[in-house]
Image (tube, rainbow, N blue to C red):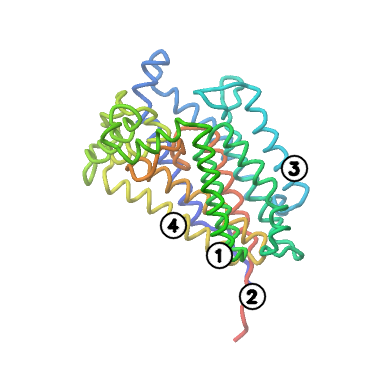
């Protein structure tokens, strides 16, 4: 007997809670700065976030409702991949923002192509690695398959955006491991990364300074580690239950980017250890539901796709939280669903839409009694 599954309601609940909590924290962390910079409009950032939320929700609902999973079709996969590479190339034409090539500006909004390139490379690799004739341990063929991955990684490194570079690499490594790549090839890849990292540090010496600062936090407390020190102070001052929503003091121009990369710091300060653990728990449930949906997806293609997308979200959350508590160098990675930022929010909702659509279409064969 074949059992059809309905859409994963738990994943809907988890995603909804993360998004709702994100809106609350975006308003809480931006109301003071918005009031000062935008003519007394303390809802300025919240309104922009809601616009992006509506866009993301619309796309997520459309994707989740698809009767035919278009994201699995070859022409769609390669079309998305080409668009992603083209958008990444466009950032070098539109110019620098905050001393890096990461955004495309239009009509008062900015779009970060790397957020969508992450989805594109996962769609591409899940399609290619699931083909019957592909042997993941045939290194020559695998390297050919990985050419678009190398192109995207090099373009992101050129921006430079080391955070997303590492995030994509970690996610792809999980996908290759799940696809059956032998451990000795991971070891070889790791050894090859060492000289590549040395070369990167020579090309961008300021990155080496950040690493030295991370290893010597006290010496750089007023410069490179200023954000991290303010972040740890914010989280520590929150205690068990926090100072209450809206009562953060670190967001009062002490902690830069409190509403984006360091929003978890404000969470720790305002809702304490209990609220912080609740957020971490939601991402843990997201991981469990994603793995479960992948297991029963019925095909290697959807299995790799859901695993890749799930770990992309979870790894991103892990990196962001690790940075805010000082156990990982600063990377400029937003907290999924929660941080202020349209590109990240839309991309995360699209990811949820894809995983939910897979959950609708999964089937399992049950033995008759």
Based on the displayed image, in which of its 4 quarters is residue 269 positioned? top left
Residue 295, given in percent of the width and then of the height, sits at 57, 66
Which of pointers 1 and 3 lies earlier in the amino acid sequence? Answer: 3
Residue in front for this viewpoint, 287 or 245:
287
The x and y percentages for residue 110 are 56, 26
Q: Is residue 239 left or right of residue 132?
A: left
Q: Which residue is mark 1?
A: 183
Measured Cα–Cα span from mark 1 to mark 2:
32 Å
Q: Give the numbered dot on residue 92.
A: none
Q: CA distance from mark 3 to mark 2?
A: 34 Å
Q: Nearer the viewer, mark 1 or mark 2?
A: 1
Residue positioned 62% across, 59% down in the render = 304
Residues at badges 1 and 2 in contact (C-beta under 8 Å)? Answer: no
Which sits earlier in the primary sequence, circle 2 or circle 4? 4
In the picture of the structure, the residue carrying the numbered disc 3 is 79
Density class for disc 3 (Cα within 10 Å; few <14, some 14-19, many ≥20) is few
The residue that disc 2 covers is: 365
Closer to the N terminus: mark 3 or mark 2?
A: 3
Please tell me whether mark 3 or mark 2 is closer to you in this view: 3
Does residue 39 appear to the left or right of 219 in the view shown? right
Mark 2 or mark 4, which is nearer to you? 4
The picture places residue 2, in percent across and down from the top left corner, at 66, 74
**Residue hosting label 4:** 285
């Amino acid at each position: 007997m074949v059992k059809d599954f309905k859409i994963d309601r738990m994943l809907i609940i988890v995603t909804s809670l993360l998004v709702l909590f994100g809106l609350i924290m975006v308003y809480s962390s931006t109301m003071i700065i918005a009031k000062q910079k935008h003519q007394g409009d303390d809802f300025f950032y919240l309104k922009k976030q809601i616009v992006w939320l509506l866009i993301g929700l619309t796309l997520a609902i459309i994707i989740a409702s698809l009767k035919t999973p278009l994201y699995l079709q070859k022409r769609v996969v390669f079309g998305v991949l080409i668009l992603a590479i083209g958008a990444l190339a466009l950032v070098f034409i539109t110019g620098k923002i905050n001393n890096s090539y990461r955004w495309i500006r239009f009509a008062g909004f900015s779009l970060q192509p790397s957020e969508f390139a992450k989805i594109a490379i996962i769609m591409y690799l899940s399609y290619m690695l699931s083909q019957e004739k592909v042997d993941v341990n045939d290194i020559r063929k695998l390297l050919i398959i990985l050419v678009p991955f190398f192109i995207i990684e090099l373009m992101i490194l050129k921006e430079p955006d080391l955070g997303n570079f590492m995030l994509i690499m970690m996610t792809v490594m999980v996908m290759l491991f799940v696809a059956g790549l032998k451990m000795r090839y991971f070891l070889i890849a790791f050894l090859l990364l060492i000289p590549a990292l040395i070369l990167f540090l020579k090309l961008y010496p300021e990155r080496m300074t950040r690493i030295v600062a991370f290893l010597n936090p006290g010496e750089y407390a007023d410069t490179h580690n200023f954000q991290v020190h303010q972040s740890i102070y914010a989280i520590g001052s929150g205690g068990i239950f926090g100072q209450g929503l809206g009562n953060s003091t670190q967001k009062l121009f002490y902690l830069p980017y409190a509403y984006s990369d360091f929003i978890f710091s404000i969470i720790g300060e305002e809702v304490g250890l209990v609220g912080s653990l609740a957020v971490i728990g939601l991402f843990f449930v997201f991981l469990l539901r994603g793995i479960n949906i992948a297991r029963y997806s019925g095909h290697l293609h959807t299995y790799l796709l859901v695993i890749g997308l799930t770990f992309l979200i979870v790894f991103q959350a892990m990196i962001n939280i690790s940075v805010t508590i000082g156990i990982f160098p600063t990377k400029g990675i937003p907290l999924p669903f929660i941080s202020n930022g349209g590109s990240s929010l839309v991309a995360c909702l699209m990811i949820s839409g894809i995983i939910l659509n897979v959950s609708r279409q999964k089937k399992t064969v049950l033995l008759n009694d």
